Image (tube, rainbow, N blue to C red):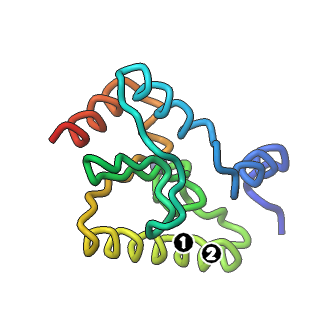
Amino acid sequence: MTDRVAPDRRSFIMSKVGQKNTTPEMILRRALHARGFRYRLHRRDLPGSPDLVFPSRRKVIFVHGCFWHGHGCRWGMAPKSRAEYWLPKMEANKARDNQALTLLREKGWQALVVWQCELRNTAPTVERVIAFLDD
Ligand SMILES: [Zn+2]
């Protein structure tokens, strides 16, 4: 059984897994910084270790990789082969993500999830994030 994702693509995907400073996150961080927003990174004392934390606004942002967090978009589908390996991992991640959002809400934090694919269209996504932060 062959894997539908080419080996170089797979190694690209895997190289992103578990990395903290992924490219989509850096795109958003740079854009927000340029607009004057300041934030903390990867606060481990908050549920889910949000990628960007804005303590005075009591808001957090997660930048989720579509594949690893099971977005369901064209970049977030499990490979057809070995689905029995990937699907449970993606489902577990989604469950963990949802639990983190619930816990954050209970602690009085507002959270926004930004998907990797949304940052392919950077400008409108950044505007949406800023609207969330300024709300
Ligand atoms: Zn996506």
**Horizontal side of residue 81 vs 33, given as left or right:** right
Residue that mark 2 sits on: 89
Residue at image point 70% right, 49% down = 16
Image position, residue 107 (x, y; %): 28, 71
Q: Amino acid at mark 1?
A: Asn
Which disc number belongs to residue 52? none
Placement of the N terminus among the 4 image quadrants: bottom right
Placement of the C terminus among the 4 image quadrants: top left
How many marks overall?
Answer: 2
**Element assignment for label 2:** helix
**Element assignment for label 1:** helix
Using the numbered discs, state the Cα–Cα distance from disc 1 to disc 2 in whole angstroms.
Answer: 6 Å
Mark 1 Cα within 10 Å, few/some/many (few <14, many 20+)? some
Mark 2 CB near ligand 1 (8 Å cut): no
Residue at image point 76% right, 45% down = 12
Mark 2 Cα within 10 Å, few/some/many (few <14, many 20+)? some
| Dot 1 and dot 2 residues touching (CB under 8 Å) | yes
Residue at image point 51% right, 58% down = 43
Q: Amino acid at mark 2?
A: Lys
Residue that mark 1 sits on: 93
**Is 98 above or below relative to 44?**
below
Image position, residue 90 (x, y; %): 57, 70
**Is 38 above or below relative to 3?**
above
- Of 67 and 6, nearer the camera is 67
**Horizontal side of residue 78 vs 124, given as left or right:** right
